[in-house]
């Protein structure tokens, strides 16, 4: 183990690589993200050809994977896997909140729920972008990360519900009005398009491609980040843990080189697929 | 010429043997005495040879040579020999040919299709050039020729026909009932499809196809398209508008199902564009998967009727059954779905219009805000990074 004090006042750029690592995500959260982005890429790759079924690439892709029977089969398969992952996440939340009575799930500095500080951070951040104020310091989850989380949460419900309404239309028709059967396709495709455009442009840049993280933030793959990165990105959480004396409890193992390489291969593949889909989507959307 | 002189020699010998009377050739054998020679040619170098046994076995075998070659009565033959006139016996056919697209004076149109008159067979004989199974090849002698087609402004129809369902039935199955060229175009009196007398003129097509497809034609004539054609509305589609004339496909084939929706849409433009917005179209337009509803799956193919007609599959009372053909469990509220809803039309589909408007605003609003946010952030973060690095560089220096 390296000497904590040495790292604490080291301050050099390269020091982080030999320094302490802190756990940010549990294995469960990392698996959830892996399932989420795998199925999301699958859903996007099979959903976009249906949305832009008039474009040549959609028809070529459909032919390659085995026609539209195959496309719709894989779309439904990914949808079911993602739904299961979502339900497991919800069950986990419910059990943490109501059975284990875990504090800080719905409110406070470690919660995903937006609070007054997030609103202040958003304006502070915008002021800092324009050089009108200091850079805000963030807690465990910054406002854009909370937005990402709730965008997915809302998207899961909206896209999921409208998707199942189409899949089992005669059943849903029992309690939905007639025009709703028309509306679900509009909702499904527009919300899906929003999710695809948002994830493949905004999320990719905010989380992975911005200068602080470029070319990729590995923390969601390895689960740990260097002390320097922790302090720089989430100073308030770092200080809070330090003052509560809980910092040491969060120390994790430095990621092995295989772990970093594996994460790079998986991450860059996902980003590459996403960017290809983004270009195809934009080209088809703007031509409509 | 050597041949001519040898013929003259043979004929002279024959004449002497026939008691030296002036020759008035009557029997075919007399003619064949010279014309059986396989190398016999006239002065212009054309073969004038006739295979006697082949001729005897042919449809014309019972005729005497002079019955067709009427101007040749003696030997030596006259200087000018007029071409044989088939119409002296085949007057009806000749009359038909006279006003047809094939009445070209320069060539001998009978031989072009029927072949050599000395080895001609009845049309139900498989050796005949106009036997049903041989007709496409016979017509194809000209109509498979790109240059010929271009010259006359015609499509090169033979390849289209031979790969069509009719062509397959004829060439692969050997079906005598399969439509061949003359089933639709006639034989001697072939007219342009622009001629109202032609069996391929637009308003005559249902009757022409109906000579085999009687049931379908009856259905068609009962539908809106058939009634419109009967009224003389030339915009209405006939059989060939959807099925094409020569390259007709099996209607259950994927290729046909893929090509037909745009054909309906070429007239019903607004219906095609609203259909394109639906899942039926999105899933169906990508090949390989052909089971989604196309126009005729709901509207019927031949007997298309308006929704106001109780017999129409899209009449309100029939919708549950019609949708239920694909959607097991379709019920009264399920069929409230509008397969041609227009989300861009606020008056026709207000609920859908506002749903789409909300979704579009959500999409545009979210992306606009975050794109600006991200771009500003990128610039600022990069600026800070460069500043920090240069400050550190300065420290080390």
Image (cartoon, coloured by chain):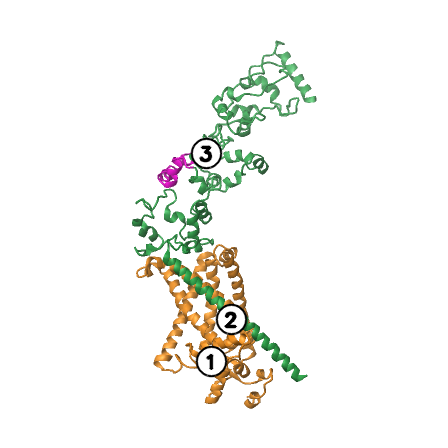
Q: CA distance from mark 2 to mark 1?
A: 21 Å
User: Does B212 appear in magenta?
Assistant: yes
From the image, tell me which residue sits under label 2.
B373
Q: Give the camera-side residue of B359 and B99.
A: B359
Q: Residues within 10 Å of mark 2 (few under 14, many from 20)?
A: some
Mark 1: which secondary structure?
loop
- Residue B81 locus on image (x, y percent): 60, 18
The colour with which the image depicts chain A is: orange
Q: Where is B380 relative to A50, above or below? A: below
* Chain letter for the green part: B
From the image, tell me which residue sits under label 3.
B201
- Residue A151 locus on image (x, y percent): 44, 70
From the image, tell me which residue sits under label 1.
A140
Q: Give the camera-side residue of A122 and B325.
A: A122
Q: State which region is magenta.
A: B204-233
For the point 61% across and 77% down, the residue is: B386
Q: Mark 2 or mark 3, which is nearer the start of the sequence?
A: 3
């Amino acid at each position: 183990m390296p000497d904590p004090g040495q790292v604490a006042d080291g301050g050099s750029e390269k020091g982080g690589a030999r320094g302490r690592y802190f756990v940010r995500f549990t294995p469960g959260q990392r698996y959830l993200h892996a399932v989420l982005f795998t199925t999301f890429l699958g859903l996007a790759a099979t959903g976009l050809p249906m949305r832009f079924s008039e474009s040549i690439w959609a028809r070529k892709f459909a032919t390659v994977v085995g026609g539209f029977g195959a496309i719709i089969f894989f779309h439904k398969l990914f949808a079911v896997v993602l739904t299961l992952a979502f339900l497991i996440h919800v069950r986990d939340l419910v059990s943490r909140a109501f059975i284990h009575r875990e504090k800080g799930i719905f409110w406070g500095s470690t919660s995903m729920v937006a609070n007054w500080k997030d609103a202040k951070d958003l304006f502070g951040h915008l002021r800092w972008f324009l050089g009108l104020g200091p850079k805000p310091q963030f807690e465990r989850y910054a406002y854009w990360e909370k937005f990402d989380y709730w965008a997915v949460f809302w998207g899961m419900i909206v896209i999921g519900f409208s998707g199942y309404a189409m899949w089992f239309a005669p059943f849903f028709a029992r309690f939905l009005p007639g025009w709703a059967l028309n509306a679900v396709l509009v909702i499904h495709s527009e919300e899906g398009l929003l999710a695809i455009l948002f994830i493949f442009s905004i999320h990719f840049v905010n989380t992975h491609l911005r200068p602080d993280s470029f070319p990729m933030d590995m923390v969601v793959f390895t689960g740990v980040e260097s002390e320097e990165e922790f302090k720089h990105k989430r100073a308030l959480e770092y200080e809070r843990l330090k003052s509560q004396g809980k910092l040491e409890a969060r120390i994790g193992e430095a990621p092995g080189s295989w772990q970093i390489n594996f994460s790079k291969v998986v991450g860059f593949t996902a980003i590459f697929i996403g960017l290809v889909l983004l270009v195809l989507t934009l080209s088809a959307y703007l031509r409509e | 010429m050597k041949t001519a002189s040898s013929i003259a020699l043979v004929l002279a010998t024959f004449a002497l043997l026939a008691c030296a009377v002036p020759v008035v050739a009557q029997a075919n054998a007399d003619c064949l005495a010279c014309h059986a020679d396989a190398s016999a040619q006239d002065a212009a170098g054309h073969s004038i040879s006739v295979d006697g046994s082949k001729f005897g076995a042919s449809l014309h075998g019972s005729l005497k040579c002079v019955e067709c070659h009427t101007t040749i009565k003696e030997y030596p033959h006259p200087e000018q020999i007029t071409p044989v006139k088939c119409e002296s016996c085949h007057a009806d056919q000749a009359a038909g040919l006279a006003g047809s697209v094939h009445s070209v004076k320069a060539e001998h149109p009978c031989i072009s299709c029927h072949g050599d008159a000395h080895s001609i067979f009845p049309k139900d004989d498989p050796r005949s050039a106009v036997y049903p199974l041989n007709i496409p090849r016979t017509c194809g002698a000209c109509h498979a020729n790109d240059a010929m087609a271009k010259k006359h402004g015609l499509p090169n129809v033979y390849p289209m026909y031979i790969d069509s369902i009719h062509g397959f039935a004829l060439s692969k199955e050997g079906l005598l009932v399969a439509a061949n060229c003359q089933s639709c175009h006639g034989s001697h009196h072939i007219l342009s499809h622009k001629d109202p007398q032609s069996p391929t003129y637009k308003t005559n097509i249902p009757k022409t196809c109906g000579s085999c497809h009687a049931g379908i034609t009856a259905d068609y004539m009962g539908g809106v398209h058939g009634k419109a054609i009967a009224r003389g509305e030339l915009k209405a589609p006939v059989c060939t508008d959807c099925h094409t004339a020569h390259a007709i496909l099996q209607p259950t084939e994927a290729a046909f199902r893929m090509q037909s929706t745009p054909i309906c849409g070429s007239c019903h433009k607004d219906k095609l564009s609203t259909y394109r917005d639906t899942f039926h179209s999105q899933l169906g337009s990508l090949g390989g998967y052909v089971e989604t509803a196309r126009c005729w799956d709901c509207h019927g193919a031949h007997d298309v009727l308006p929704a106001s007609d109780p017999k129409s599959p899209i009449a309100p009372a029939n919708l549950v059954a019609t949708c239920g053909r694909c959607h097991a469990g379709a019920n009264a509220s399920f069929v409230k779905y509008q397969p041609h809803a227009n989300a861009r039309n606020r008056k026709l589909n207000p609920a859908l219009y506002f749903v789409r408007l909300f979704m579009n605003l959500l999409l545009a609003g979210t992306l606009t805000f975050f794109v600006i946010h991200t771009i500003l952030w990128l610039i600022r973060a990069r600026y800070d990074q460069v500043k920090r690095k240069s400050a550190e560089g300065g420290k080390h220096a």
